[in-house]
Image: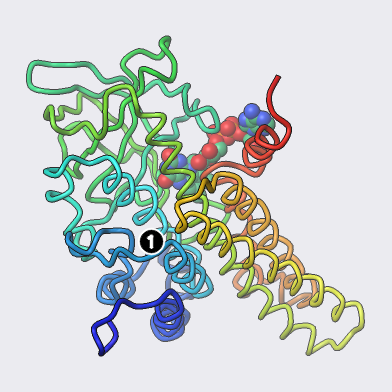
Amino acid sequence: VPADGRERSAEEWRTAARAFADREILPRNEEIARTERIPTPIRDGLARGGFMGLTVPQDLGGSSASTLAVVQVLSEIARGSAAVATLLSVHLSVACAPIVSWGTPEQKARYLPAMATGERLGAFALTEPGAGSDAGAIQTRFRREPEGFRLDGSKMFITNGGLADLLLLFATEDPVLGRKAVSAFLVEHGTPGLSVSQKLAKLGLDGSETTELVLDGVRLPADARLGPEGQGIRIALKALTDGRVGIAACALGVAEASLEELIAAARRSAADVHRARAARAYAEVLAARALVERAARTKDAGEPFVEAASAAKLIATRAAVDASNAAVEVAGFEGGLARSRASGLLRDARVFPIVEGTSEVQELILGRSLVGTR
Ligand SMILES: Cc1cc2nc3c(=O)[nH]c(=O)nc-3n(C[C@H](O)[C@H](O)[C@H](O)COP(=O)(O)OP(=O)(O)OC[C@H]3O[C@@H](n4cnc5c(N)ncnc54)[C@H](O)[C@@H]3O)c2cc1C
């Protein structure tokens, strides 16, 4: 909070996040890649800086920040490390925010204050080995029991899956009944029957934990369901639309870091063709920032933002891939080294078009909205 007690502006949040990324994250990138985990001082710093509570209301210990502030923070943190930004984006957009929107007063009071301070980390568990883009095809079952619910099944590609203290997890009463049979549940870490069956090695985002989870007779109390029965897919899709703006901001940060690398490499070579690559990437990155900020402002204005979110994710993730690819090429041999900054950015960038709705899914959403369905 600024000295005069008023709320921080989005620009002030951005400045704070940039300083944190420069001071605490960038110097630890090599350690993140080597250990494939996010060092404790970074987790602590995210908490101390107030970043973990951005989407939590002030009366529950957060800062009720605008979406514009969230995207400014995520893009600056991602400029430092895409893995750190992904941990934060998932916690803020698809764990805290749905509890704010759908939680009972008791659920909010139980979980949100500790999530806002960073004491507890959140995760979102929808995807399964056979259900990615088609979320309605999930097979993880819940059964009603006298005391509450019993869950059985598995979840795939879950960010923060083993680290999280709380999972927002989706299960169906009966897969043949389709989307209307899916409900959302809050599952605490350490609940008997919940385990991590594997940590997945990925193309990029070293340090962001991605896991497969198994649920074997997980018993939950009756008040563990989030939102009304049968509204799970609605809750998931709303969370993913919010999350899309966050992931677009993460991709934007990678695009901006890649542009810095590209310009530095082009200065070394001073070839006209490399100047042109830098110019093209510059224009694409500016366009991505404009779209990400526009999606955030549209959401903050309370207007429908589904199209703005999809357009921002489509373009920002493409800008990240294009700019990092150009940075690798322009740096030549050095860019191609496994541990070069440019190759690390390219590996990170390549993951973002897949998560929280692939590029094809964004095109489907936009296409249906623009052209209609028959
Ligand atoms: C690093 C990482 C982190 C992740 N974190 C999480 C997480 O925290 N929680 C979570 O629940 N999930 C998470 N996911 C899962 C992610 O959301 C899915 O990978 C994504 O939804 C795609 O699903 P899929 O992998 O099953 O691919 P599929 O849905 O099988 O798609 C394969 C290809 O087919 C295309 N395709 C699919 N359907 C259509 C269609 N109807 N029309 C046109 N093209 C189509 C896709 O675009 C894609 O190119 C994560 C994934 C990754 C890689």
Residue 207: which quarter of the image? bottom left
Task: Give the answer, above or below, for where 79 lies relative to 321.
Answer: below
Task: Give the answer, above or below, for where 69 lies relative to 128.
Answer: below
Task: Give the answer, above or below, for where 328 lies relative to 2.
Answer: above
- Residue 340 makes an appearance in the image: yes
Picture mark count: 1
Residue furthest left as drawn = 147
Q: Position of residue 80 (x, y in %)?
A: 49, 75
Q: Residue at x 51, y 50 (%)?
A: 244
Q: Position of residue 145 (x, y in %)?
A: 13, 16
- Residue 157 makes an appearance in the image: no
Q: Position of residue 186 (x, y in %)?
A: 23, 38
Residue furthest top as drawn = 176
Q: Is residue 372 left or right of residue 127?
A: right
Q: Is residue 227 left or right of residue 257?
A: left
Q: Using the image as rendered, state which of residue 42 and residue 122 is in the foreground.
A: 122
SS for dot 1: helix
Q: Residue at x 33, y 59 (%)?
A: 55
Q: Using the image as rendered, state which of residue 105 and residue 40 is in the foreground.
A: 105
Q: Is mark 1 within 8 Å of ligand 1?
A: no
Ligand 1 quarter of the rendering: top right
Q: Position of residue 297 (x, y in %)?
A: 51, 61
Which residue position holds label 1? 88
Question: What's the amino acid at mark 1?
Answer: Leu
Image quadrant holding the N terminus, namely: bottom left
Q: Residue at x 30, y 48 (%)?
A: 162
Residue furthest right as drawn = 272
Q: Residue at x 60, y 51 (%)?
A: 308
Q: Is residue 199 left or right of residue 366?
A: left
Q: Residues within 10 Å of mark 1 (few under 14, many from 20)?
A: many
Tell me how the rendering is colored. Answer: rainbow
Image quadrant holding the C terminus, namely: top right
